[in-house]
Amino acid sequence: MPLGFSMKEMKDNKRILVLPGDGIGPEVCKEATTILELVNEIHSLNLSFSEALVGGSAYEATGEPLPQDTLKAARESDAILLGAVGGPKWDELDYQYRPERALLGLRSELDLFANFRPAILSKYLTSSSSLKANNVENLDLLIIRELTGGIYFGEPRGRTEGKKEAFNTMIYNQDEIERIGRVAFEAAQKRNKNLCSVDKANVLEVSVLWREVITELSKEYPDVILSHMLVDNAAMQLVREPKQFDVIVTGNLFGDILSDIAAMMTGSIGMLPSASLNSENKGMYEPVHGSAPDIAGKGIANPIAAILSFAMALKYSLNLDKEADNLEKAVQEVLDEGFRTKDILSKGTKEVSTIEMGAAIISKLK
Ligand code: NAD
């Protein structure tokens, strides 16, 4: 038996489904998958890998952005690693055939209700941030957004007949708030034990309920310090003093906006991973960026967001915290040595291609 090969790992043959998608998706996925296969080999993790079509490339091959085979494979896997979907070629298609429909389909079919968006800023990239260096240096915050409820899905919704009027419904029930709350408290327990719940309780009844449920739940997590903040203040505080936050938990609409504000603080979209989990910790892991058609096929895409997404898969779906930390450390070391893809290049650093960045990270892991 190889060293470090536990009985648990031997029993659990965890399945990883790779969905490269479109544009730079396959380019960044290739580097991330090579790294995962290496991590699998080095640590004898007994992970198994398969690949399937998604997005525009799936539409070309099958007429569907999310073919049944892909959905079946997704249901049977423990973690899904997605590159990106979409591109101008498919922009004119009917809504149901658009590549982005595949993402919504996967989220709802797998009930991926908890979206994790870390905003981490490497000390070397402070100059790429839109904020002053001292405000963002060593920034490390996590935004947890409820992803399958709230105003984006609430009924009734629509247009009023006979007049120019439209409406949506913001609705959350106790169970929905509790399950995202639990995920957030548990994530805070693994970090600095500070959780800020963001709502609009001065105006919205939904937010009053949200605050009540989260406050009640906090009794089960006495080691986590809970605070509440109104969303308008949270937006201000994020750009004023983002390092005051550890974990933020919020609903679908507010999370959508706040996580993009946080993304801007880190400078490059090519560095940002994300995860969407269900109640069994099954998850879809993907870079925050899209398919970047402007640079697709040029070999210059930054693979770090995809690689760090895969590190999140190790941590959250596969319970391999140590291996995830090693991978994050390898990425940091490569940045320490000045390797940069074009999007994060600065004076005095070395420009590398997508493949060279992957190879540099591999050399650290070995
Ligand atoms: P984008 O994220 O693809 O690109 C925005 C800009 O960032 C571009 O200039 C691009 O070159 C750059 N960029 C993105 N990722 C990069 C990387 N890894 N390395 C270096 N530079 C990178 O956003 P967009 O241009 O608005 O969208 C392009 C397509 O992607 C659209 O079809 C959109 O619908 C789709 N999209 C998909 C997802 C997803 O799959 N989750 C997310 C967002 C957008």
Image (cartoon, rainbow, N blue to C red):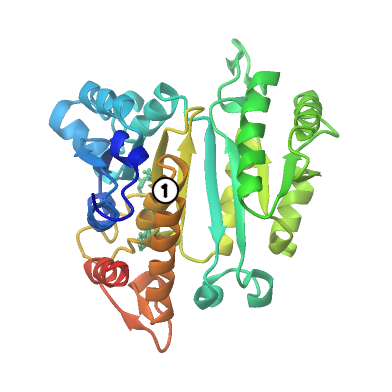
Measuring from the top left, give residue 131's x and y in whole percent: 64, 70
Measuring from the top left, give residue 152's x and y in whole percent: 57, 27
* Image quadrant assignment for residue 333: bottom left
Residue 173 can be seen, yes or no: no
Q: How many marks?
A: 1
Establish if 299 lies above or below 233.
below
Residue picked out by circle 1: 320
Q: Quadrant of the C terminus?
A: bottom left
For image coordinates 33% across by 43% down, the residue present is 81
Q: Is 283 displayed left or right of 262 in the figure? A: left
For image coordinates 40% across by 38% down, the residue present is 284
For image coordinates 51% across by 66% down, the residue present is 267
Q: Residue furthest right?
A: 202
Residue type marked 1: Leu
Q: Is 263 displayed left or right of 209 in the figure? A: left
Q: Residue furthest bottom?
A: 348
Establish if 30 lies above or below 80.
below
For image coordinates 59% across by 39% down, the residue present is 145
* Image quadrant assignment for residue 246: bottom right
State yes or no: Cβ of the residue under disc 1 lies below 8 Å from any atom of ligand 1.
Answer: no
Measuring from the top left, give residue 48's x and y in whole percent: 23, 40
Q: Secondary structure at mark 1?
A: loop
